[in-house]
Image (tube, rainbow, N blue to C red):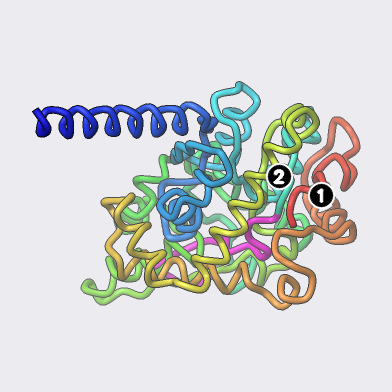
Amino acid sequence: MRAVRVFGCVLALFASLSLSIKSTQENLKSITFLTNYVFIGRHAPFFVGKEKGFYREAGFDINILPATGSAFVITALEGRQADYGMVEAASLVQAIAQGASVKAFGVYMDQSTSGLASLDPYPTLESLTGKTVAASLTDSARVILPSVLAEGQLNESTIDWLTADPGVYFSLLLSDRADLVTAASDSDVPTLQRIVEPRGRTVHFSSFADWGYDVYGYFLVARSDRLRLRQEEVRAFATATATAVDYAITHPEEAARIMARYSPALDEMTALAHWKGSISAMNTAAVQDGGYGIATQERLQRSIDFVGRAFEFKTQVTPNDLYAHGFLP
């Protein structure tokens, strides 16, 4: 009889714990976050935040999904298919100028790692004349490169765009169907280098930053109405993300292991190479002086002016249209 009573107590305790866990899960807010691209080392902090419980502690059950470019992320946010995302600064400026109701609330990456990868060197903007550049329609390079060309007194018509899915960029390059592909120094370049080295080839990378693209790298973004109506929620998400970034920078090997588990296409070595490249663009001197994730009015204006040289804005964009302050600690 005693055994029966003990067993009954155990069942009651288990039921109580189950109800407690269920209650905790029900109290979590389900959110969808979109990365700007297929999962790469740059996205490690979001998975670190999920794995280490930073988002859960902030009250979120986060679902992280890949995208095919910044324009895709912006469209998904506007269509309420996602709650938060990350986009390149130039794409956000252009979208807001065209009337998009999306806004940044944190700087995820201080410097841009974007540029063009090729198997032959293209050291100057002038050397791109007549060359074929592969990029998806939603790739942020379709905004950045025309802006860079305009800065160098060149026209976008000097290059030939080849519309392609990001998944075939490398094959287009290797088959000589494209002279250059849009790429990032903290992801595509180390991956491509491992592919071409056995063939006796070398990857050349032309950084947009080296051609005068001195604006922010990636923003954390959401719909403008969410920033206005759900300030505590946004602040909690931003704080959890900043905590995850700090942890991932301090523990890069662990961050790479976590990232590789969530992306079967990445091994730990490649994920670590990606993430170390991202760290250098995130933990800059400006960040160390001013704090992570914080934007300045001067640099926001510079981002707007840079994009405005290549694209005609339907409406004037101000730093306050682009970025909402006060969400990061």
Per the rendering, the mark at residue 235 is 2
The relative height of residue 73 versus residue 272 in the rendered view (above or below) is above
- Across and down, in percent, residue 43 comes to 48, 54
Q: Is residue 124 above or below residue 107?
A: below
Identify the residue at image location x=76%, y=27%: 225
Residue 100 visible within the image: no
Magenta stretch: give its range: 107-122
Q: Where residue 157 appears, x then y in whole percent?
A: 65, 46
| Neighbours of disc 1 within 10 Å: few (<14), some (14-19), many (20+) | few
Tell whether 328 sits left or right of 80: right
Residue 156 at what x, y percent from top left? 67, 48
What secondary structure is marked by label 2?
Answer: helix
Q: Are marks 1 and 2 in contact (CB under 8 Å)?
A: yes
Instruction: Identify the residue shown where x is 63% and y is 62%.
Output: 112
Q: Identify the amino acid type marked 2.
A: Arg
Verify whether residue 156 appears in magenta: no
Image quarter where the N terminus lies is top left
Q: In the image, which disc is placed on residue 299?
A: none
Per the rendering, the mark at residue 326 is 1
